[in-house]
C-alpha cells in the first residue's frame, strides 16, 4: 500500500479535510507541520514540492521505485485516498453516478466558491490592495459564508427528505469538506449556524460527534498553540 505523508498546518481547513478523510478510512500516515503563520509555505523547501505554495500537500510513495507523487490540491488528494484505498472502512464516494455528482457539486461549493474567498491570501489582498479594515474583512468573509452555505443547504434539500448527512445517511466527501467550512464560518466569522441554516446545523450536529471529526479539529493538532487553551489566535471576529 502507498505510504502517505501529509504536509499541513493546524488551522488550514484544506488540511482538515484530509485529516478527517484519512481518519474515517483508517489510513495511517505521517505528518510534516508547515508553519503557515511564519510563511514557511513560501520558502524554498516547500515550494520545491508545491510550486503553488498552498497547503496541504499529500505525498504518496507507491514503493515501486518511482518518485513519490506530490498531490497539491486537497480535492485531488481526497479522490486519491478514495481510489488508492477503496476497501478501507468507509466509501466516501457513492456507487450511484447521480449521487456521486451530487457529492461533487457540494464539494465544489465549498472548495471553489466559498473557501478561496475567505482564504488568508484573499484577505491579505483586500488589505494590501484596497485598504480593507479588519471589520470589513470579517463582513466580507461572513457574507460569503452565508451565500455559499445557503446554496449548499438548498442543494442538500432539493431532492427530498434529508438524511443524517449531506447526501443521505452515508458519510461522503461532501461532509468531509463541510465540517471545516462550518467551523470557519462559526468560529472565525461569527455565523450563527442554527439560526441561519437549520438543516446544515442538524447535519453538522451529526458530524461533530464523530471521533474522527473531533480528533481532526484544529485545536487538537500537535502544531496548534497550546498556550491559547483552545482559543483560535487567528480568528478575526470580535467576540
Image (cartoon, helix red, strand yellow):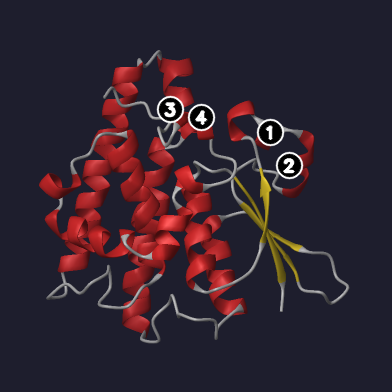
Q: Name the mark on residue 40.
A: 1
Packing grade of label 4 (10 A; few <14, some 14-19, many >=20) is: few
- The residue mark sitting in front, 1 or 4, is 4
**Disc 3 to disc 2, C-alpha distance:** 22 Å
Residue at the (47%, 61%) spot, across then down = 20
Packing grade of label 1 (10 A; few <14, some 14-19, many >=20) is: some
Element marked by disc 4 = helix
Residue at the (36%, 73%) spot, across then down = 171
Identify residue for label 4: 227
Q: Position of residue 178 (x, y in %)?
A: 35, 57
Identify residue for label 2: 46
Please say if 215 is above or below 136. below
Counting residues from the N terminus, which is met first, the one under dot 2 or under dot 4?
Answer: 2
**Disc 2 to disc 4, C-alpha distance:** 27 Å
Identify residue for label 3: 123
- The residue mark sitting in front, 2 or 4, is 4
Element marked by disc 3 = helix
**Disc 1 to disc 4, C-alpha distance:** 21 Å
Counting residues from the N terminus, which is met first, the one under dot 1 or under dot 2?
Answer: 1
Q: Position of residue 88 (x, y in %)?
A: 54, 81
Please say if 118 is above or below 107. above
Packing grade of label 3 (10 A; few <14, some 14-19, many >=20) is: many
Please say if 19 is above or below 139. below
**Disc 3 to disc 4, C-alpha distance:** 26 Å
Element marked by disc 1 = helix
Counting residues from the N terminus, which is met first, the one under dot 1 or under dot 4?
Answer: 1
Residue at the (59%, 70%) spot, across then down = 80
**Disc 1 to disc 2, C-alpha distance:** 7 Å
Task: Quarter of the image for the N terminus: give it.
Answer: bottom right
Counting residues from the N terminus, which is met first, the one under dot 3 or under dot 4?
Answer: 3
Please say if 229 is above or below 154. above
Pointers 1 and 2 in contact (C-beta within 8 Å): yes
Amino acid at each position: 500500500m502507498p505510504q502517505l505523508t501529509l504536509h499541513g498546518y493546524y488551522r488550514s481547513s484544506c488540511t482538515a479535510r484530509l485529516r478527517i478523510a484519512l481518519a474515517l478510512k483508517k489510513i495511517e500516515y505521517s505528518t510534516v507541520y508547515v508553519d503557515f503563520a511564519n510563511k514557511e509555505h513560501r520558502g524554498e523547501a516547500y515550494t520545491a514540492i508545491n510550486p503553488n505554495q498552498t497547503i496541504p500537500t499529500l505525498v504518496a510513495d507507491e514503493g515501486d521505485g518511482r518518485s513519490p507523487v506530490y498531490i497539491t490540491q486537497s480535492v485531488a488528494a481526497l479522490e486519491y485516498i478514495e481510489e488508492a484505498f477503496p476497501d478501507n472502512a468507509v466509501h466516501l464516494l457513492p456507487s450511484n453516478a447521480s449521487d456521486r455528482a451530487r457529492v461533487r457539486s457540494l464539494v465544489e461549493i465549498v472548495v471553489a466558491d466559498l473557501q478561496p474567498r475567505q482564504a488568508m491570501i484573499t484577505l491579505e489582498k483586500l488589505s494590501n490592495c484596497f485598504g480593507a479594515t479588519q471589520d470589513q474583512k470579517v463582513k466580507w468573509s461572513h457574507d460569503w459564508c452565508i451565500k455559499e452555505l445557503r446554496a449548499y443547504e438548498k442543494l442538500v434539500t432539493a431532492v427530498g427528505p434529508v438524511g443524517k448527512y449531506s447526501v443521505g445517511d452515508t458519510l461522503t466527501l461532501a461532509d468531509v469538506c463541510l465540517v471545516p467550512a462550518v467551523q470557519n464560518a462559526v468560529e472565525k466569522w461569527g455565523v450563527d449556524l442554527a439560526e441561519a441554516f437549520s438543516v446544515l446545523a442538524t447535519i453538522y450536529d451529526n458530524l461533530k460527534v464523530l471521533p474522527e471529526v473531533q480528533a481532526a479539529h484544529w485545536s487538537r493538532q500537535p502544531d496548534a498553540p497550546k498556550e491559547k487553551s483552545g482559543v483560535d489566535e487567528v480568528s478575526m471576529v470580535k467576540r
